[in-house]
Image (spheres, grey):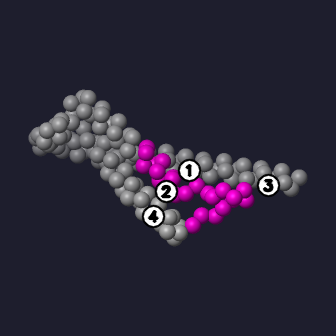
Amino acid sequence: MACFTITAGEALVVTAAQITVKVLEHKGIIKYETNEDGTSKAKWSKKLGILNGMLWGGSFLLALEHIYHGEVSMTFPFLTAMQSAEQTAEMLEEMSTVGVTMALSLTAIWGVGLLLYYFFKERKAAKKAIEVKE
């Protein structure tokens, strides 16, 4: 019914964090080490941008799905579940279970992706160091 609002809310928070980190990177407050080949490490603003895209994209697609099924209208109160107290209670329960689970799942998937990125990056660096020793 309105589970997409939870993901959109998290996306707003991540957008604010991404903008803040980007400003701090631009001012030089957040600095990154450079690799041996002169390239800099992946910036946190870029990593947050990936999470941001996942959250906004998922929220948008869910909103379209809810509009298609008639759960969202273009007139006030916009959510059809807000027309009675019983429907509103059901909507809030869905938001607290399904919406929170979806938002946490997207964030967990992003986190696992970062862990895999760092794992394979360190593995590649370790193989390179072994080759240099030999």
Q: Distance between the residues labelled 3 and 1?
A: 22 Å
Residue contact at pointers 2 and 4, CB within 8 angstroms: no
Give the amino acid type for the residue marked by disc 1 in the picture.
Leu
- Image depth: mark 3 or mark 4 in front: 4
Q: Where is residue 22 in the image (x, y as percent from the top left)?
A: 47, 60
Question: Is residue 98 toward the left or the right of residue 120 in the image?
Answer: left
Question: Is residue 55 toward the left or the right of residue 1 in the image?
Answer: right
Q: How far apart are marks 2 and 4 (CA)?
A: 9 Å
The span shown in magenta is: 31-54
Q: Mark 3 points at which residue?
A: 129
Q: Reply above or below: 60 against 130.
A: above
Q: Which mark is residue 45?
A: 2
Q: Residue furthest top?
A: 69
Answer with the quarter of the image where residue 93 lies: top left
Q: Distance between the residues labelled 2 and 3?
A: 29 Å
SS at circle 1:
helix
Question: Is residue 14 toward the left or the right of residue 118 in the image?
Answer: left
Circle 1: is it few (<14), some (14-19), or many (20+) Cα within 10 Å?
few
| First in sequence: mark 3 vs mark 4 | 4
Circle 2: is it few (<14), some (14-19), or many (20+) Cα within 10 Å?
many
Residue contact at pointers 4 and 1, CB within 8 angstroms: no
Q: Mark 1 points at which residue?
A: 114
Give the amino acid type for the residue marked by disc 4 in the picture.
Val
Q: Residue at x 18, y 44 (%)?
A: 89
Q: Where is residue 118 in the image (x, y as percent from the top left)?
A: 62, 52
Residue contact at pointers 3 and 1, CB within 8 angstroms: no
For the residue pair 99 and 52, the one nearer the viewer reads as 52
Q: Mark 4 points at which residue?
A: 23
Q: Which residue is drawn at 43% across and 45% down?
A: 53
